[in-house]
Amino acid sequence: MSIQIDRLTKRFGSFTALNEVSLTIPTGQLAAVLGPSGSGKTTLLRIIAGLEMPDEGQLFLHGVDATPLSARDRQVGFVFQHYALFRHMTVFENVAFGLRVQPRRSRPSEEEIRGRVKELLRLVELEDYASRMPSQLSGGQRQRVALARALAVRPKVLLLDEPASGLDPRARIEIKELLKELKSMGKTILISSHILPELADFCNKIGIIEKGKLVISGGVQEIMRQVRGGRVLLVRVLDEPDRAIELLETMEGILSASVDEVHSAIRIEFAGDETAQHALLRRLIENGVRVQSFDEVQTDLEEIFMKVTRGIVS
């Protein structure tokens, strides 16, 4: 199910939490909304889930105007930042809760509920914890219970608010791998986060929100090139880096070339495409530069974030 957000605005009294935010996420993609605390990320997710109503704008789910629909009718699952598990219920009953409270005409049988809960607990690798209480679980385990509960009603869209917040490194890796698996199953997933490094290698799309406004959105590599004005290449040479830099400065598409002491390489800001990169490397070699390695710098979300935001929150 695709998500199309069209100029959504949300105010709380005189405070504007979201200001004409527009964003499209195709079916089956995993996208992230990034921003500092107080920027409007959670408000956006709550509007998509039907827990808040916008003051202006529209929300379309798979092309249908979902703005007036209730949360129950949207086929959206929500994993809250602090999990919101029922402390008096076991893990099993927490996951089953959304199924048991469905209207009688659409409620699965008890046998179907038990089967679905067991299947989900296997998916999140908690089948041996079914009878435990939330207080007996780690933060990462509670996160996975909350995820299983959100999946129980078979939503077409899955929303996760700060899924990596407060988790240790192992738990972050586990939740990332689980999200990758859900993505491979065709789920449309939108997460909010201020923890950046984990997202670049598995998100199809990101949007950065600052003070309620969407500052930039698009594919990770697309945004990086837009922000940088091109690609960044690292070229290691066996000797004579100064001569290599002089040669590079005569080539078309070179925005800058300098020695990068941290990486012991020549750092090149380059405006060309992959074909132009190949031509650049060929010319270096033809001119006697002994190239040891030639790489494009991988995307760094923290660099994007710092360049496009100014640290403004309310």
Image: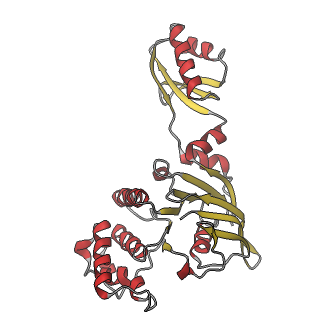
Name the image quarter holding residue 142.
bottom left
Left or right position of 192 against 38: left
List x then y, in percent, for residue 22.
69, 61
Give the camera-side residue of 187 and 278.
187
Q: Residue furthest right?
A: 14
Residue 101: x percent and y percent?
43, 89
Number of marks in the rendered image: 0
* Residue 269 position in % (x across, y down): 61, 29
Quadrant location, the C terminus? bottom right
Coloration of the structure image: secondary structure
Decide which of 214, 28 is in the foreground and name it.
28
Q: Residue at x 44, y 62 (%)?
A: 164
The residue shown at (43%, 77%) is 153
Please indicate, yes or no, whether residue 216 appears anywhere in the rendered image: yes
Please state if 11 lies on the left or on the right of 155 as rendered: right
Residue drawn at point x = 58 percent, y = 66 percent: 62
| Name of the residue lying farthest toward the left | 128
Residue 8 drawn above or below residue 262 = below
Q: Quadrant of residue 44?
A: bottom right
* Closest to the observer, 283 or 241: 283
> Taking 270 as reference, is 244 above or below it?
above
Q: Is residue 287 above or below residue 44?
A: above
At horizontal 56% and vertical 74% (from top left) the residue drawn is 49
Counting from the top left corner in percent of width and height, residue 45 is at 58, 70
Q: Is residue 80 visible?
A: no
Q: Front-most of 76 and 247? A: 76
Q: What is the residue that sits farthest to the front in this orientation?
A: 105
